[in-house]
């Protein structure tokens, strides 16, 4: 079980990412635009750097919805490997069965 503060911090990052998503896309498009003047590109870089650090999607971590575990998370289910396994054994996850060969 991850600390509650770490999970809360990650949720806060998710909100920030969502809030600044459009602005970040516009600034990045301006930086990449070949027809933009060097002054415009530099201005876009400066504005991009002034955005909050936690507004960057790279800083967001996929975490288990149940335990908050940050490693071994299956994206499709949003669960850590341990929780996924225990819920699959109980038959709580639809369409997942234990394989044997």
Image (cartoon, rainbow, N blue to C red):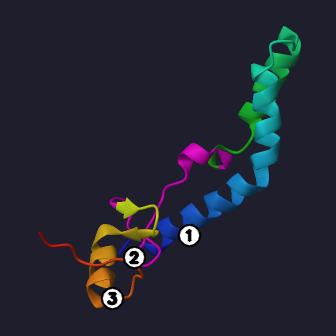
Q: Secondary structure at mark 1?
A: helix
- Label 3 sits on a secondary structure element that is loop
* Mark 1 or mark 3, whichever is nearer to me: 3
Residue 8 bears which disc, if any?
A: 1
CB contact under 8 Å: marks 2 and 3: no
**2 or 26, nearer to the observer:** 26
- Residues in magenta? 55-72
Q: Residue furthest left?
A: 101
Q: Furthest-front residue in view?
A: 101
Image height of 30 relative to 73, above or below: above
Q: Earlier in the sequence, mark 1 or mark 3?
A: 1
Q: Where is mark 3, residue-wise?
A: 91
Name the residue rendered at 73%, 56% in the picture: 18
Point out the image quarter for the C terminus: bottom left
Q: Residues within 10 Å of mark 1 (few under 14, many from 20)?
A: few
Q: Is residue 25 left or right of residue 75?
A: right
Q: Is residue 19 left or right of residue 89?
A: right
Q: Main secondary structure of the magenta part?
A: loop
Q: Which mark is residue 67?
A: 2
- Counting from the top left corner in percent of width and height, residue 38 is at 83, 9
Q: In the figure, residue 97 lies in which quadrant?
A: bottom left
Task: Please name the residue shown 87% across and 14% down the image.
Answer: 36
Above or below 4: residue 53: above
């Amino acid at each position: 079980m991850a600390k509650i503060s770490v999970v809360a911090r990650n949720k806060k990052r998710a909100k920030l990412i969502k809030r600044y998503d459009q602005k970040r896309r516009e600034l990045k498009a301006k930086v990449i635009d070949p027809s933009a003047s060097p002054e415009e590109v530099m201005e876009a870089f400066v504005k991009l750097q002034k955005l909050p650090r936690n507004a960057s999607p790279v800083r967001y971590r996929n975490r288990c919805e149940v335990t908050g575990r940050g490693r071994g998370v299956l994206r499709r289910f949003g669960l850590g490997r341990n929780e996924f396994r225990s819920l699959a054994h109980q038959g709580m996850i639809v369409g997942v069965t234990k394989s044997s060969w």
